[in-house]
Amino acid sequence: MAQTIEFTHSLNVQDLSADGRDYSLVGDQDVFEEIKKRFDIVEISEFQALVRIQDKGKHNGVWVTGHIKASLVQRCIVSLEDVGETINEEFELMLVDEATVERFDNDEAYLDPEIPDYDLLEGDTLSPGEIAIQTLSIMMNPYPRKNGVEIDLGTATDVSINEEEIKRPNPFSVLSELSDNNKKS
């Protein structure tokens, strides 16, 4: 059963176990106000997180898995009207040392869909609430747009907003034609 904790609660990394522990977080009005200011959103009426934290050892870091549920309102990037959003998603995060982050970055591990998101484990403590808040910010639509609203470009030309992407010829098709011609010769 998950232990209910406040968003401000911190855990000492040395106290984490390999078996893991579940934590339940439920946002209140103070948390909502902090999130509204921090991410410049109009409203948030629900924010819950179920977070499991496991210490996988020195070489594998701390694994944080969980589920985020939130209801919020952002401004449309075109009309500035309110746009509601409901988030109900699972997440997975590895917190690792600086050398591992550097190795992952150099290997471009962030491009591999099989590797979970990773971040630097800083210091001796971590905050499940802060992890949940940062995860929410990543899950939020970065460009909220009200249905049916389109950008008015006026007299601008050579812009393809609100249109399907223009199909351009494959630049390698010329090479393919040359190769075909050489085979015929």
Image (tube, rainbow, N blue to C red):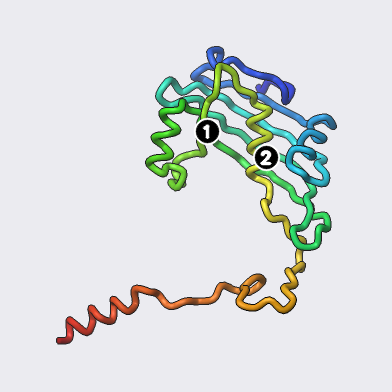
Q: Quadrant of residue 13 in the image? A: top right
1 vs 2, front mark: 1
10 Å neighbourhood of mark 2: few (<14), some, or many (≥20)? Answer: many
Residue furthest to the top in view is: 15
- The quarter in which the C terminus is drawn is bottom left
Of the residues shown, which amino acid type is indicated by label 2? Leu
Tell me where residue 173 sits by quadrant: bottom left
Task: Tell me the residue that label 2 is attached to.
Answer: 136
Marks 2 and 1: in contact by CB < 8 Å?
Answer: no
Residue 46, percent across and down? 79, 38
Please say if 176 is above or below 9: below
Looking at the image, is 83 positioned above or below residue 173? above
Q: Is residue 2 left or right of residue 167?
A: right
Residue type at mark 1 is Asp
Residue at mark 1: 119
155 left or right, relative to 115: right
- Pick out the residue farthest to the left: 185
Residue 48 is labelled as: none
Q: Quadrant of the N terminus?
A: top right
Give residue 131's position: percent from left, percent from top: 63, 31
Q: Residue at x 66, y 33 (%)?
A: 132
